[in-house]
Amino acid sequence: MIKAIRGMRDLLPPETSRWQWVEQVAREVFGLYGYREIRLPLLERTELFARSIGADTDIVGKEMYTFPDRKGDSLTLRPEATASVLRAVLENGLDKGAGVKKLYTLGPMFRYERPQKGRYRQFYQINCEAFGVDAPELDAEVILLLLDILTRLKLGEMRLLINSLGCPDCQVKFKAAMGLFLISREGLCEDCQRRRDTNPLRVLDCKSVHCKEILKDAPVIRDYLCPDCTAHFARVLAWLKRFGVAYEEQPKLVRGLDYYTRTAFEVVAAGLGAQDAVAGGGRYNGLSQALGGPLLPAIGFAIGEDRLLEVLPKDLGQENQFKVFLAALGEAARDRAFHLLQELRQRRVAAEMDLEGRSLKAQMTQADRSGATYAVIIGDRELEQGEALVRPMRAFSYKKGEGPKLTELPSGRIVENQERVALKDLTALLAARARE
Ligand code: AMP
């Protein structure tokens, strides 16, 4: 048997209905904040990521799925969305005009990382990107938007970690200080020894316990911020405070990508173990120019959907759809039921039936398993009388000799036992109940 590729998993029902629900909530909240969707190719020229994410990053250095196409051009499966969004914005002139431009996108990303719980090689992100405005109010709004989505999804315990990475001027000074600090330290991992020379800021991103220990008394970027960056950060924090957002300043927080400037943030959730970041983002004012575009201030975030779903309550977003199961006995009844089935669907009522002529008991078991709200039973006798038995199912388990119980409909209405309903009125009645 051919199996799925390591680190790439199938998302199966009923779990997929939780995913749909998360995405639906995210779309709704994006709408409230004035964002519109953009859909992008999964493949881009390798150069796009090499130029934007940074050659010293783990992503570009080790984790990209890069291959030549049939013409020999180097292509890469996108490891993140921001570079692609910005490429599309510049290519299609979406940056033109005054004011903020707001875009969101959902979909899979690909990174050749070591798979573990909460870390996959194909994983899914919900991405938010806002362009054209450098005001700290936008930083605050983007963070409020992120927290709004996570709160509406009922994510329990979460912490917002925040830092400022300054502008390129601040970063030059900080990197020099960090470089000096690192020269005198022994025992950095191989990667960090290299980063010390190429980009000392990246050392802060190292996962090695030993490097983390060395960095305990390393300089922090906050001490190297210019007055503008200091004021910007103070204003972002002031807004968060005014909106009652609890945040934790993390002077060593950097992001895994090189293009961040000023505000950088992460949301970590309880119950995720080592891979506890469910979302991360920040400002990337310099990215547009790095890609050959105009100066275009920008800020965004990515929610890791896989991890988010790991920690969200398991029963959320589960289908609670009004459904009907038609159980028919005998050929004539089955023919009639098949018509009713399509009629129900035309009336926007979810409906199913058995197509194999199985026993009533088997059909009722199937009705139960399907999560039907009602079973409609049509036998020869019912057919003759032009009626059907409508039996509430939700609290019903089919056992011989046991009568149906009281049942609560999704609307909260309690219905009693089964009813006899004229076949001619059946679909209208069920459609009305479905709308309750
Ligand atoms: P990043 O693009 O690295 O800033 O990541 C943003 C979010 O995507 C992280 O906070 C994670 O929740 C999620 N994420 C990143 N890499 C992976 C991965 N390999 N598997 C699952 N989720 C990931």
Image (cartoon, grey):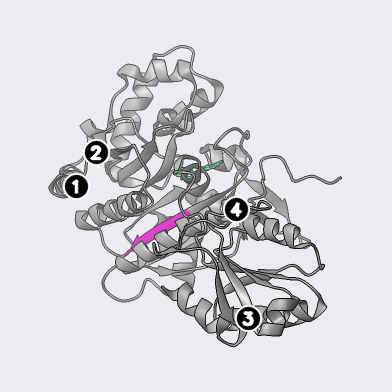
User: Are dots 4 and 2 in contact, CB under 8 Å?
Assistant: no
Indicate which disc residue 247 carries. 2
Give SS at disc 4. Answer: loop
**Residue at point 49% right, 44% down?**
314
The amino acid at mark 3 is Glu
Is residue 41 in view?
A: yes
Nearer the N terminus, badge 3 or badge 2?
2
Indicate which disc residue 387 carries. 3
Which residue is at the far top? 186
**Residue 249 screen position, x and y as percent:** 25, 34
Which of 152 and 111 lies nearest the eye of the viewer? 152
The amino acid at mark 2 is Tyr
**Residue 373 screen position, x and y as percent:** 54, 63
Which of 369 and 287 lies nearest the eye of the viewer? 369
For disc 1, does the CB lie below 8 Å from ligand 1?
no
The amino acid at mark 4 is Pro
Q: Quadrant of residue 162?
A: top left
Which of 181 and 250 lies nearest the eye of the viewer? 250
The amino acid at mark 1 is Leu
Inspect the magenta stretch and tell me whether residue 168 lies in it: no
Give SS at disc 3. Answer: strand
- Residue highlighted by disc 4: 14
Q: Nearer the viewer, mark 3 or mark 1?
A: 3
User: Are dots 1 and 2 in contact, CB under 8 Å?
Assistant: yes
